[in-house]
Amino acid sequence: MAKALFQVRNLKKYFKTSRGVVHAVDDISFDIEEGKTLGIVGESGCGKSTTGRCLIRLIEPTSGQVFYRDQDICQLSRAEMKKLRKEMQIIFQDPYASLNPRKSVLQIIAEPLLYNKIMPGADKFAIEKRVLELMDKVGLAERLINTYPHELDGGRRQRIGIARALAMEPKFIVCDEPVSALDVSIQAQILNLLKELQRELSLTYVFITHDLSVVNHFSDDIIVMYLGQIVEKAPADELFENPLHPYTQALLSAILVPAVGANRDRIKLRGELTSPIDPPPVCRFAKRCNYYNQDCAAGVPPLLEITPGHFVACHRIKPGSNTLVEAN
């Protein structure tokens, strides 16, 4: 078993609004193994991106602990965190919004090198040489070095974002839906690039997406989130072969199956979403669950290890079981 690079314990992030407190991330715990990819999936608004940004303290957690190499980064000062953040980077979802339109490719990729004084004393020729090395690593042609983001397509813009993240020589990267804003024909190229970089540079990823077909092929382990909480966590193959939580089963039933003769019954969810504003202390999926009964109102179900490495938060699934107990 690989060593845990991150250990997240009881992480919470709440936002105060005029209507109440939004429980964006609500008491979640998990580990991220070094050199592996942890996928985080769920509907929009489930807390995926908030979790990723809390991991590297782009936003401050409300409470909880985030251990990076056994050090709780939530206790670090801003200056201490700035030094450590060189090892942590993020690739944003929208390459059209995450790049400064008034800067060239050279200036964008060189910015973290200059700001963090990665190459002290280096002249502009040395900086440009390093930028060209990074461009080559992510598949950007040398001739594009003086172009601006508006002159490039989405795939090339996202490669600039990846090169900018790699400039710091990080150990860990949060990939926040890095292909969702791209054409389908470009998505595979970016995913293959990220995989190649992971093998070459021994990177650890958190891969955030709502696309289950993508996360299955890209991740080693997968977390399924629902309204700020983890409802299921398992190795990727295990999750797809034997989903146990009713929400996970519904998500997987929506994936198109291209195989000839394949048949998968679509699971239709009923009811309405529970509000994330001051939610009641019960299962948040209960209103939409096809297995709901009175036991589901007996508090928030804990995340329990049902079989080795497979964790589920559901009142109707008990440790040692590999199926969901049918509703009465």
Image (cartoon, grey):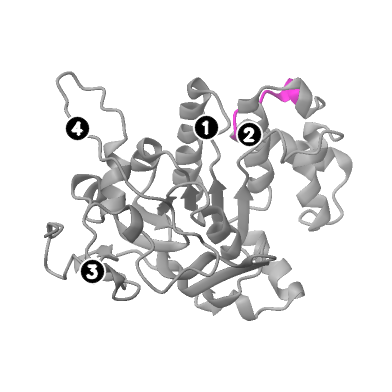
Give the magenta-colored segment's residue range.
138-144
Pointer 3 or 4: first along the chain: 4
Nearer the observer: mark 4 or 1; the answer is 4
- Who's the residue at 24% across and 47% down the image? 237
Which residue was labeled with disc 2?
A: 158
Circles 4 and 1, Cβ within 8 Å, touching? The answer is: no
- Which of marks 2 and 4 precedes in the sequence? 2
Question: Which residue appears farthest toward the bottom when viewing the image?
Answer: 75
Residue at image point 67% right, 78% down: 76
Residues under numbered marks 1 and 2 in contact, where contact means CB atoms less than 8 Å apart: yes
Label 2 sits on a secondary structure element that is: helix
Residue annotated with mark 4: 264
Q: Earlier in the sequence, mark 3 or mark 2?
A: 2
Q: Secondary structure at mark 3?
A: helix
- In the image, which disc is placed on residue 190? 1
**Residue 40: numbered disc:** none
Residues under labels 4 and 1: Cα distance? 29 Å
What residue did someone put label 3 on?
Answer: 294
Q: Position of residue 136 (x, y in %)?
A: 63, 31
Around disc 3, counting alpha carbons within 10 Å, would you say few (fewer than 14), some (14 to 19), or many (20 or more)?
few
Q: Residues within 10 Å of mark 2 (few under 14, many from 20)?
A: many
